[in-house]
Amino acid sequence: MATIATLTLKTDGNLDGTLATLNVTAPIALIPNGRKAKDNEPDYRIVSRKNGFELGAGWNRISKNTGEQYVSVSLSAPEFGTIYGNVAPAPGDDPAKKVIIWNPAS
């Protein structure tokens, strides 16, 4: 499993950070979807902080193994295709620091 983004939880609920792969480094934000009207709509929108374009979405999930809540994300762009991942706590003791862990398609 590879870390593909580092994020910081902001007081407004946004997660701001940097998506970093071998070919792409881009400022991103996971923004809570305040307009969610249906259960299948995403809980977060993922946008580029550089140009405001939407890159993907995130859904709140509950782990079957631990019962803990996490965010499952999907990002898409011509530069890298589609990437799936999960938001997880970053190493260390700061609860505001998060990472996106790449979850390769099976």
Image (cartoon, rainbow, N blue to C red):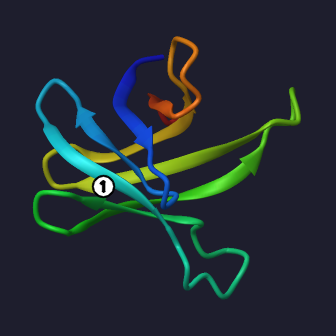
- Residue 75 is situated, as x and y percent measured from the top left of the image, at 36, 52
Q: Which element is circle 1 on?
A: strand
Which residue appears farthest toward the top when viewing the image? 92
- Residue 70 is situated, as x and y percent measured from the top left of the image, at 67, 42
- Residue sitting nearer the eye, 98 or 102: 98
In the rendered image, which quarter contains the C terminus?
Answer: top right
What residue does disc 1 label? 76
**Left or right placement of residue 97 versus residue 72 in this view:** left
Which residue appears farthest toward the front when viewing the image? 11
Is 86 drawn above or below residue 60 in the view shown?
above
Disc 1 residue type?
Answer: Ser
Around disc 1, counting alpha carbons within 10 Å, would you say few (fewer than 14), some (14 to 19), or many (20 or more)? some
* Residue at screen point 55% across, 37% down: 86
Q: Tell me the quarter of the picture where residue 83 sits.
A: top left
Numbered-mark total: 1
* Residue at screen point 61% across, 47% down: 71
- Residue sitting nearer the eye, 5 or 22: 5
- Residue 48 is situated, as x and y percent measured from the top left of the image, at 22, 58
- Residue 55 is situated, as x and y percent measured from the top left of the image, at 29, 60
Is 38 drawn above or below residue 78 in the view shown?
below
**Left or right placement of residue 41 versus residue 12 in this view:** right
* Residue at screen point 73% across, 76% down: 39
**Left or right placement of residue 18 versus residue 41 in this view:** left
Q: Tell me the quarter of the picture where residue 18 sits.
A: top left
**Left or right placement of residue 67 versus residue 9 in this view:** right
